[in-house]
Image (spheres, rainbow, N blue to C red):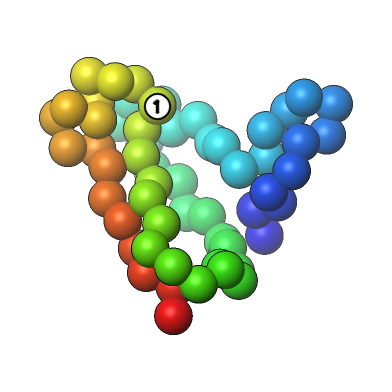
């Protein structure tokens, strides 16, 4: 489960995905709403590496 808080300034809701790689993450969304996930590289966001998902 991805935690939503920091321990010693290390973000636990962010992961690094290297070029030509994939990751499978396990999460339990518990707050309703429309959420966005995205790459933190601005050029990548412009290229479409951003989407949303809905928790009902």
User: For mark 1, what is the residue?
Assistant: 40
Q: Quadrant of the C terminus?
A: bottom left
Count all numbered tags in the image, as a single digit: 1
- Name the residue: 50% across, 72% down: 32
Quarter of the figure that contains the N terminus: bottom right
Residue 14's x, y, as percent?
56, 37
Residue at x 60%, y 71% (from the top left corner): 30
Q: Kindly indicate the quadrant of the structure image that contains residue 40.
A: top left
Residue at image location 73% in from the left, 28% down from the top: 10
The location of residue 39, given as percent across then percent down, is 36, 33
Q: Residue furthest left?
A: 47
Q: Position of residue 13 (x, y in %)?
A: 61, 43
Residue in the foreground of this view, choosing between 4 and 18:
4
Q: Which of the 4 image quarters holds residue 34?
A: bottom left
Q: Is residue 36 placed above or below 28 in the rendered structure?
A: above
Residue sitting at the far right: 8
Give the class, few, some or many, for how many residues have Cα within 10 Å of label 1's Cα (few <14, many ≥20).
Answer: few
Question: In this picture, is 30 found above or below 26?
Answer: below
Name the foreground residue: 6 vs 24: 6
Task: Give the left or right position of residue 10, taking residue 30 as reference.
Answer: right
In this orientation, which residue lies closer to the viewer: 6 or 31?
31
Outermost residue, front side? 33
- Residue 35: image location, x then y, percent: 41, 57
The vertical placement of 31 against 43, above or below, is: below
Residue that appears at 24% across and 38% down: 49
Q: In the image, 55: left or right of 14?
A: left
Q: Secondary structure at mark 1?
A: loop
């Amino acid at each position: 489960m991805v935690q939503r808080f920091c321990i010693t300034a290390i973000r636990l809701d962010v992961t690094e995905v290297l070029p030509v790689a994939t990751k499978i993450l396990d999460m339990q969304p518990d707050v309703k709403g429309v959420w966005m996930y995205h790459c933190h590289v601005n050029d990548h966001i412009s290229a479409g590496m951003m989407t949303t998902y809905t928790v009902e």
